Image: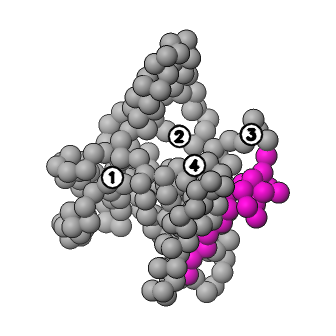
C-alpha cells in the first residue's frame, strides 16, 4: 500500500520517481511470493475511481485495502495473504489487517509513536505562525480523542487490560512506541494478559536482531 499523496503502485509521483514499491514487489516475487500492488484512488489506473477531494475520506482507503485482501482470499492459488504498507500506507494496513483478517502485516516507515501525540507535535510546530489555526486544529484533535470517534471503528482504552478485553481472540496487538527497552517492558506487561495464538506486532523502527530475539522469547 503506497504512502501519502498521489503515489502510484510503483511508489512514484509526478515529480518523484524511485520505484521503491516496484523494487519491493520484484524482490518478493524473486523469492516466490506473489505480490499485488495497486494505484490509490484517483491515481494512475485508479483515476476513474477517484472522488472530489472534499468527498474523499481516509476510511475509503482502508476499505479499498480490505477489499483487495478479501479478493485475494477467494483466490485458491494463495495460501495466505499479508499486507505491506509504506508511511500512510502503513496506517492503512494497520487498520485493514484485522478487518480483513490478514495473516501478516509489514510496516515500512510507519508510526512509532502514539498517533494523537505525533499529530499534536506536528500541528504545534507547523502552525506556529498561525495561532488561530493551531488552536482550532488542536481543539479538533482533543474532540476526536475525547469522543468524536464514537460510532466509528475506534475504541478508546485506558489500560492494557481494557485493550486486551476489547480485542477478539486470536488477538493481534500492535505496539507503536519508541524502539529499545520500552518495547521489552511493554511485551512483559502484555504476556500475562494474552492467550496462546495471540500475536504481538512491533510496529516501531526496531533493529531486526531485537525482533528475532523477542520472537524467540515470546514463543
The picture places residue 168, in percent across and down from the top left corner, at 46, 54
Q: Is residue 154 above or below residue 27?
A: above
Q: CA distance from mark 2 to mark 1?
A: 21 Å
Question: Of the residues tagged 2 and 3, which is closer to the observer?
Answer: 3
Identify the residue position indicated by label 1 in the image. 204
Element under label 2?
A: loop
State yes or no: residue 177 in magenta. no
Identify the residue position indicated by label 3 in the image. 53
- Residue in front for this viewpoint, 121 or 114: 121
Residue range (magenta)? 34-51
Q: Is residue 117 above or below residue 38?
A: above
- Residue at (50, 60) in percent of width and height: 85
Q: Earlier in the sequence, mark 2 or mark 3?
A: 3
Sort mark 1 into few (<14), some (14-19) or many (20+) by Cα contacts within 10 Å.
many
* Label 2–label 1 contact, CB within 8 A: no
Q: Earlier in the sequence, mark 4 or mark 2?
A: 4
- Residue at (68, 62) in percent of width and height: 39
Identify the residue position indicated by label 4 in the image. 4
Question: Of the residues tagged 4 and 2, which is closer to the observer?
Answer: 4
Identify the residue position indicated by label 2 in the image. 154
Question: Of the residues tagged 1 and 4, which is closer to the observer?
Answer: 4
Q: Earlier in the sequence, mark 3 or mark 4?
A: 4
Sort mark 2 into few (<14), some (14-19) or many (20+) by Cα contacts within 10 Å.
few
Is residue 6 toward the left or the right of residue 126 in the image?
right
The picture places residue 131, in percent across and down from the top left corner, at 50, 13
Element under label 1?
A: loop
Question: Of the residues tagged 2 and 1, which is closer to the observer?
Answer: 1
Q: Is residue 55 above or below residue 20?
A: above
* Label 2–label 3 contact, CB within 8 A: no
Question: Of the residues tagged 1 and 3, which is closer to the observer?
Answer: 3
Amino acid at each position: 500500500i503506497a504512502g501519502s499523496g498521489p503515489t502510484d503502485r510503483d511508489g512514484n509521483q509526478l515529480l518523484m520517481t524511485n520505484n521503491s514499491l516496484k523494487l519491493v514487489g520484484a524482490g518478493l516475487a524473486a523469492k516466490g511470493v506473489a505480490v499485488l500492488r495497486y494505484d490509490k484512488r484517483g491515481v494512475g489506473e485508479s483515476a476513474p475511481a477517484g472522488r472530489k477531494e472534499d468527498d474523499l475520506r481516509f476510511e475509503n482507503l482502508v476499505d479499498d485495502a480490505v477489499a483487495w485482501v478479501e479478493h485475494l482470499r477467494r483466490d485458491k492459488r494463495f495460501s495466505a495473504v499479508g499486507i505491506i504498507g509504506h508511511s500512510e500506507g502503513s496506517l492503512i494496513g494497520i487498520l485493514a489487517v484485522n478487518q480483513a483478517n490478514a495473516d501478516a502485516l509489514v510496516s515500512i516507515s510507519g508510526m512509532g509513536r502514539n498517533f494523537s501525540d505525533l499529530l499534536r507535535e506536528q500541528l504545534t510546530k507547523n502552525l506556529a505562525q498561525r495561532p488561530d489555526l493551531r488552536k482550532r486544529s488542536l481543539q479538533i484533535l482533543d474532540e476526536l480523542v475525547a469522543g468524536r470517534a464514537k460510532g466509528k471503528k475506534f475504541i478508546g482504552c485506558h489500560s492494557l487490560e481494557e485493550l486486551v478485553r476489547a480485542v477478539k481472540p486470536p488477538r493481534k496487538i500492535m505496539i507503536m512506541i519508541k524502539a529499545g527497552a520500552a518495547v521489552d517492558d511493554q511485551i512483559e506487561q502484555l504476556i500475562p494478559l494474552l492467550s496462546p495464538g495471540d500475536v504481538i506486532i512491533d510496529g516501531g523502527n526496531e533493529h531486526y536482531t531485537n525482533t528475532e530475539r523477542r520472537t524467540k522469547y515470546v514463543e
